[in-house]
Amino acid sequence: MEIRINVTTKKNNQYEPVMVAYFVMVARDKFTNKAVKVNQLEPATEADRHLLEIGAESQRRRKIMAESSLYKIPPNEQERTFIHNIYLKLQKIKRGQSMDEGVFGDYEFGGRYQLMSSTLLTSTKIMHPTQRNIHNKIFGTLVCVVLTVRWLLN
């Protein structure tokens, strides 16, 4: 099941989109950790049918992305060349050359970027093992922190 959450903020009596979050929930057998069949949703309206079609398309895209993941296949020649060019341009920047060039080819930043080495860590969020979900991942707390920070910035 895929859940979409639209987060908006109210400015000047109008709601403006802030972010969209997708959560995918799956049913797993607790002993084998394999997928388990669940009852299908029956769409009651045309809008429900449309939402189910969107979800099916998202699922198809996720499967395609999983098959082309770096965990399964190595980068192709075009991807290797792209990464190598980024590396070469960053080396020029480190030597003080061509800071005005966009590092990422077609994506022109116009000098609005900086190297990680020149940044300063201003806060740290410590995640404790007790905050993990059943898949041993710490996630919900991070979403809460992101939403809180976004709320504070408005």
Image (spheres, rainbow, N blue to C red):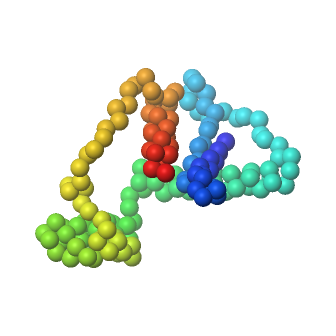
Question: Residue at the spot x=83%, y=47% of the render?
Answer: 43
Measuring from the top left, give residue 116's x and y in whole percent: 25, 56
Residue 29 location (% of width, % of height): 61, 27
Q: Residue at the location (19% across, 69% down)?
A: 93
Side (left or right) of 142 relative to 36: left
Q: Is residue 37 above or below residue 81?
A: above
Q: Residue at x 21, y 76 (%)?
A: 98
Q: Residue at x 18, y 71 (%)?
A: 92
109 is higher (above) or lower (below) than 64: below
**Percent position (x, y) of residue 41?**
78, 41
Of residue 41 and residue 153, the one placed in the foreground of this image is: 153
Q: Quadrant of the N terminus?
A: top right
Left or right: residue 1 versus residue 77 is right
Give the vertical position of 126 relative to 72 (above or below): above
Q: Nearer the viewer, residue 130 or 66?
A: 130
Specify whether residue 113 is in view. yes
Give the number of callouts. 0
Residue 72 visible in the picture: no
